[in-house]
Image: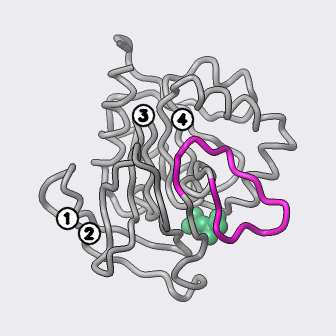
Amino acid sequence: MVTHRPRVGILALQGDVREHARVFAQMDADVHLVRRPEDLAVVDGLVIPGGESSVIDKLARAFGMRESIRAAIAGGLPVYGTCAGMILLADRLENPIAGQQTFGGLDVTVRRNAFGGQVDSFEVALEVPVLGAPPVHAAFIRAPVVEEHGRGVEPLAALDDGRIVAVRQGPILATAFHPEVSGETRFHALFLDALRAR
Ligand code: GLN
């Protein structure tokens, strides 16, 4: 059990780091920006933000972060990935760019840019049973979807056409959309629950 005020790490190589930090600032958690392997040692959980998954992948390798992040995930560190973060957590990518790698940990196959480009971004009211009412106001920005998942993966939300856009596997949480940009705090609260339970 984590008994101190939880220390949330946000992987701060690229992407919407500030938006996540702003959400946690309203909650009972301290934020640490994670840029070096040693930063991981002091956090109780890690957020992988939205952004561009291939860029975060490249920077993580350039900064010597990739193996430390993989080891932390394998060691059971609670992790929450949004959009590009979901892509980076996927064990398998349907359509990686050449040479693109993921950290993995989540037994899913993810398709990047599943809805088209930036102009095909959209917002929907999404039912998320684990969060109850009201529905989540979900912003999809060049968003991925989960095409296939293993038995240990719990789908948390799907679009009307059945495509899965939020999942959980033990302490790993991932959403294809961005609660951090729409004022939604319940996924971050769910992540903090996993973090406190550790
Ligand atoms: N399409 C982006 C990628 O491949 C993700 C977009 C986002 O995080 N908003 O990483």
Q: Main secondary structure of the magenta part?
A: loop
User: Closer to us: mark 4 or mark 3?
Assistant: 3
Type of amino acid under label 4:
Leu
Q: Quick check: marks 2 and 1 in contact, CB under 8 Å? A: yes
Look at mark 1 in the image and give the residue it sits on.
135
State the residue lying farthest toward the front: 151
Question: SS class of the residue under badge 1?
Answer: loop
- The location of residue 17, given as percent across then percent down, is 57, 49
Marks 4/3: CA–CA distance:
11 Å
* Residue 175 spot, x, y in % from top left: 43, 57
Q: Is mark 2 within 8 Å of ligand 1?
A: no
Q: Nearer the viewer, residue 87 or 37?
A: 87
Relative to 123, 160 lies left or right: left
Q: Amino acid at mark 3?
A: Pro
Query: What is the secondary structure assignment of the residue under circle 4?
Result: strand
For the residues marked 2 and 4, what is the alpha-carbon distance in whole angstroms?
Answer: 24 Å
Residue at x-position 38% and y-position 66%:
164
Task: Report how far apart the C-alphas of labels 4 and 1 lie in the structure.
Answer: 25 Å
- Sequence-first disc among 4 and 1: 4
Ligand 1, image quadrant it occupies: bottom right
Q: Please provide the residue range marked out in magenta.
A: 92-108
Measured in 3D between alpha carbons, the distance from the residue under mark 2 to the one under mark 1, in whole angstroms, is: 5 Å
Precedes in sequence: disc 3 or disc 2: 2
Q: Which residue is under mark 2? A: 126
> Residues at badges 3 and 1 in contact (C-beta under 8 Å)?
no
Where residue 123 sits, quadrant-wise, is bottom left
Residue hosting label 3: 171
Mark closest to the chain's N terminus, 4 or 3: 4
